[in-house]
Amino acid sequence: MKISGKHIIEAPVEAVWQKILDPAVLERVTPGIDQLEKLAADRYKAIADIRMGPVKGRFTGSLAIEDKVAPESCTIVLDQKSKIGNVKASITLKLVPLADHQTAVGYTGEARMSGMLARMGQRLLGGVVSTLAKQFFSAFEKEVNG
Amino acid sequence: MRVTLTVNGKPYSDDLEPRTLLAHYLRDTLNLTGTHVGCDTSNCGACTILMDGKAVKSCTILAVQADGSEITTIEGMANGGELHPIQQAFKENHGLQCGFCTPGMVMTAADILQNNPNPTEQEVRHGLEGNFCRCTGYHNIVKSVLHASELIK
Amino acid sequence: METYIGKPIKRREDNRFLTGKGRYTDDIKLPGMCHAAFVRSPYAHAKILRINTEAARNAEGVVTVFTAADGPGDFGVPCGWQVNFKNGDTMREPQHPLLAKDKVRHLGEPVAVVIAATMALARDAAELVEVDYEELPAVTNPQEAMAAGAPLVHDAWEDNAAFDWCIGNDRAEVEAALKDAYHVTELEFVNQRLAPNAIEPRSYIADYDVNADKWTLYSSTQNPHLIRLLLCAFALGIPEHKVRVVSYDVGGGFGSKIYHYTEEALLIWATKEIGRPVKWTADRSEAFLTDAHGRDHVVKSKMGFDKDGKIVAHLTDEYCAMGAYLSTFAPAIPTYLHGTLFQGLYTTPLIHLNVVAPFTHTVPVDAYRGAGRPEATYLIERLVSKAAKEMGIDPAEIRFKNFIPAFDGVKQPGYQTQVALQYDSGNYAPTLEKALEIVDYKGFRQEQAEARKQGKLLGIGISTWIEGCGIAPSAVVGALGARAGLYEVGHVRVQPTGKVTVFTGTHSHGQGHETVFAQFVADRLGIPIEDVDIAHGDTNEVAFGMGTYGSRSLAVGGSAIVKSIDKVLEKGAKIAAHKLEAAVEDIEYAQGKWTVKGTDKSISFGDVSLTAYVPHDYPEGLEPGLDFSSFYDPANFTFPFGTHIAIVEVNADTGKVTLKRFVAVDDVGNVMNPMIVDGQIHGGVVQGIGQALLEEVVYDDHGQMLTGSYMDYAMPRADDLPFIETDRTVTPCPHNPLGAKGAGEAGTIGATPAVVNAVVDALHHLGVDDIQMPLTPQRVWAAMQNVQR
């Protein structure tokens, strides 16, 4: 499944860059994340509970941040397992300064699902992802400005 | 969790796991196995029953949600040895083959005819949209429901 | 005298279904019964690195957990049909383990089974089984499976071919004729994968009785004896006389419940291990993942014509998916049930079909209603209709030009095809004539032209079909690779009071055997239908049988019963002659009694029955009793045929196809119960329409199924359809005593190309000459846009 979207954050690009790579921040603002445990530089063990209509499950696996180009772009690589199916995703974030206090965060990538997620969730998952992304960015914006 | 309800005119009261679906309660606890389960997404309609007179897919609701209600299943349609007019119409029009979707079809037909005693072919087809049959091509089921509307008059 | 045959007798089985008293497998509860839940692969292809069952074992209500290592990995379910490579090499036949051992090869393949006190607890615990996989690349398309470098389904072989096969005339000869042909029509398409979708999901209960050392399997199967044979002799190696298979009521099959599935064998193995009965019922999701699918052919085809529109040659190459393992009848479907129908109804002098059948990382493909014959009919009927458009010939006319002339199989011999089989009897043109008359073909063409002027897109599609069913002489199918005979057993037990119980080895899962069989039994014996009961579905009651599929029940199973009735009447005549003090030659049987010819001296069927069991005054040397069992091995296949015509309207803005009319004029030989035959046709036609317009199983490139529920797999619904208009001609089968040909699959075989031909007819003036099935609004709309640009 292709994933893409864009959000405008009321904060300068450097501030966004710093916070978006901070695991403590990510743990607080990412919807459903229970735990983000550092394994190595830019490598984390992630546990998340996602409950969104029919897509409901506890996901365990890894999260890595790759191809960092400060303060412009990076790629988040996810490999998550759950009882309802596994997800492998690679999402590239691009930060573009719009004005002094505004940054556009664009994301594009692809997620591959297996099991029941692929079978039943695929059609619904687009909506789930965009809702999660909205929640993430609004929480993130509060974090950056708060 | 305790559920108290009436099924086919008889009162029942049982302690159930809260997650028990009405369909499973009817089949497993009350042994009313005429209500069938054909899917897990509430599309096929084989599990259709009447709850307080309305057609409901019993795999879609929890047994506890039916607390206090009056349920009619396929077992409650005939009057002793005498078939209900809808059942009679299905038999006369060969409205069933393997019989698996049949209870759901009969219960849905009851709901259709309650709301619209003189339906057109298209209204019957529309009303049966939530019930799958793989055997009959719906041809004789639609005829059965139209015939039942005559018998009930 | 025929009191019942040919009459629309209401079904005797209906009351139990209509009052909720059907006995489907999942309705059965046994004391101490526990429930199984399977842990299934989330990948199409992966190595199993580690399985941890500890948490599941310790979960509430869990009896035990089994993986392949506990034993089930050593057993596999067999394939029942062997098709060797063209070069003579043996078909590649991998073990199909009851639980996956080191590797999983399709999505949903079982890896472990959890057995617990209730279904809910078993499913809860199944979620606690941890399996580590190393995902591997997968291939799901049969043509891609044969490409160099394609991921291998089975490492034991250098490529994915299970076998390759061809039939018909010499390829070079066919190619030469195509080269010289006046016109050649070409067609490339995918006959898409379908899920059978009986509304009752598969269900099994296995029960081991330790004291008797006996097993009982309650199974939603179409053929209990065949399952017992495969289970005992091949899957588990347990003694056949210790196993009883029961399938009372089965909620539809359509082929998918013919096969011996791993779950069946696993449950029989497990019940002895745990000493308790154990039940498993698939949910719909598991049905999509594990019921054998149908179709899935990648087709490339050429048909050559002379300038008058007569077919001169037909050449087709196909890749036909087998799935990850060979299901029970899988190899027969794209070969002997498919290639042997490439003659169609036409005099085509040169035919060649080449089939490559690869393994793919998908659930196995096997017979689904029609099984190989819908695929053949679709191909031929699309080619002929496409050619008619290209050559400017009317689609009805091109068919009349090419029909094999009528032959009854008695005065005129059967028709020898170019593809091995000999047709039994046929008279093809009248079905087309009748169908054209019903739709008012000329009138429709005017209406179509008028509608087109107003921007309305109407189309008409014709399909003239033939199928081979009621298979067949056992020696012939044996020579073609079947590992079983295809005869049938009919047992007529006359009770002392003259009441009759008939045991048939066929199985009714909607076909109405309890009514239809009783009709001809009552007529042949001249007794009331109320005095006849039909029993099936229990290996302890019925001596043997091959079950119901391939439209064989009446033609083969019915004929076996007729043989036993003949024996009853022959012996009855001896008893009657003795009682009437006449010679056997001097008495005759009619209306339930034997009469001395030319006198009023007679004895009733009931009195003869009683005498047979109370043989006080009895012919010397004659055994008591009136009870006969017969095996009937058919002399040939039967070949029903017919014409289907669809009329559609295509929405010019959205591409949505609305089926306005559907006419089916079929010839299924002699008809016992027209109500039931029509019902079979209606249902079959709608399954064919489903393939044309709605249904498709879609796997993505990684072998994930995108259509694994009713939210994504489009089933035909009541409001997608008009009434199906049926009519018939009757050309009796010359080689069985009932003259019956079979009606179960007819609808599905004929319908699909009629619908697609109609849509193409509606859009042809826009430049559309083919659309890939299913004809979803999106596909039809895209086809219109592509040519309009």
Image: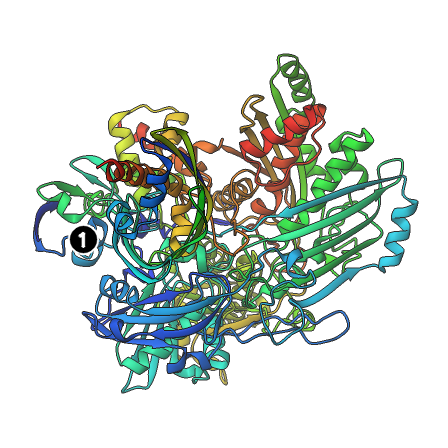
| Along the line of sight, the residue nearer the viewer: A48 or B103 | A48
Find residue C648 and report its horizontal and vertical position in percent: 58, 28
Find residue C182 and report its horizontal and vertical position in percent: 90, 39
| Along the line of sight, the residue nearer the viewer: A105 or C222 | A105
| Along the line of sight, the residue nearer the viewer: C453 or C228 | C453
Is residue C123 left or right of C575 when viewed as pictured?
left
Which amino acid, by three-letter code, is at mark 1?
A: Arg
- Which residue has dot 1 on it? B19
Find residue C290 and report its horizontal and vertical position in percent: 45, 60
Residue at 68%, 36% (x, y): give it.
Answer: C770
Looking at the rendered image, the quarter that the C terminus of chain B falls into is: top left
Is residue B31 left or right of B9 when viewed as pictured?
right
Is A109 placed above or below C230 here? above
Is residue C21 left or right of B4 when viewed as pictured?
right
Q: Chain of mark 1?
A: B
Residue at 72%, 76% (x, y): give it.
Answer: C89
Q: Could you say which quadrant of the image residue C205 lies in?
A: bottom left
